Image (cartoon, grey):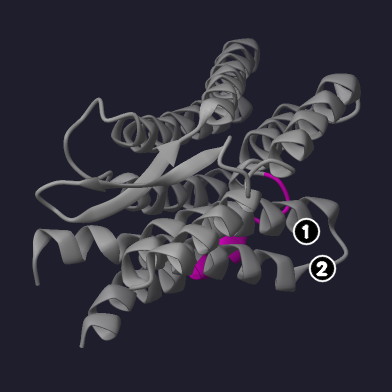
Amino acid sequence: MTARDLIVYSGLASFAVNCGLGAYVFLKNRTNPTNVFFGVFVLSIGSWSIGSSLVNLIPDEHLALLVLRRCYVSGVFVPALFVHLAYYLTGRILTNRTFLALAYLLSTMFATTVYSPLFIESLQIVAPFDFRLSNPGPIYYAFLAYFVFLVLYVLVLMYRASQRLVGLKRRQMRYIFYAHLIASAAGLNYFLSVLDVIPFPPVDDYLLVIYFGVFGYGIFRYHLMDITVVCHKGLVYGLLFGATIPAYVMI
């Protein structure tokens, strides 16, 4: 097993953990909007993160680029979904509808461009790992600015909520804030690799596994939202399953 193998298959691990946890939460209470939304949120992240594996596993470069662009259809909605999740966690879901609608509108606009060279021009190779990544077009930089802005917005929102609340609610928000810092680090690591700022492949997918592990444990530990005990077993099984995915595939 080489270092490249560990990075290539990290997307599969992230996809398995994210979708496994999301599906478990959703199936436990399919009538609860919070459970449904949580499932959609993690599915979108998983569908985006698996692209880093598929683009390096598919031999044909044209097909690999097409698949990567399809994964970005999910990825461009992650910032809006991230804000949506933050509104659920901070109790702002009924008071910030205009901003949320604008976020979804911008995500939809980016989604209409992902199959264009203006969004992803081609594939670039990270040497000496022979690792494929997106070669960004001009619209990609606009998406990056949009992504960074909303992530910073969510972090500020979470931090202010943690300062405003007291007791158990304050501990909940602090835990979720730290989890979001890990998720933000994952995004930063990925984009720095795409922009060729760091000369090695991203490890964002493994950071996302840690993020959802911390997030899931925080839900269980502090009884957050309506997916409390559900996330305990779902998190354990999801992490174990996700951790074994790369090994089974390589065998």
Q: Which residue is mark 2?
A: 30
Nearest the eye: 29 or 40: 40
Is 242 left, or right, of 26 in this rendering?
A: left
How many C-alpha atoms fall within 10 Å of the one at disc 2: few (<14), some, or many (≥20)? some
Q: Which residue is mark 1?
A: 36
Question: Looking at the image, which residue is at 62% across and 54% down?
Answer: 44
SS at mark 2 in the image: loop
- Give the vertical position of 243 relative to 181 (above or below): below
Q: Which residues are magenta?
A: 225-234
Nearest the eye: 61 or 42: 61
Nearest the eye: 65 or 43: 65
- Give the vertical position of 155 relative to 194 (above or below): above
Could you tell me what secondary structure mostly forms the magenta stretch? Answer: helix
Q: Quadrant of the N terminus?
A: bottom left
Residue 76, horizontal then vertical, whole percent: 63, 41
Return the residue found at the far bottom. Answer: 251
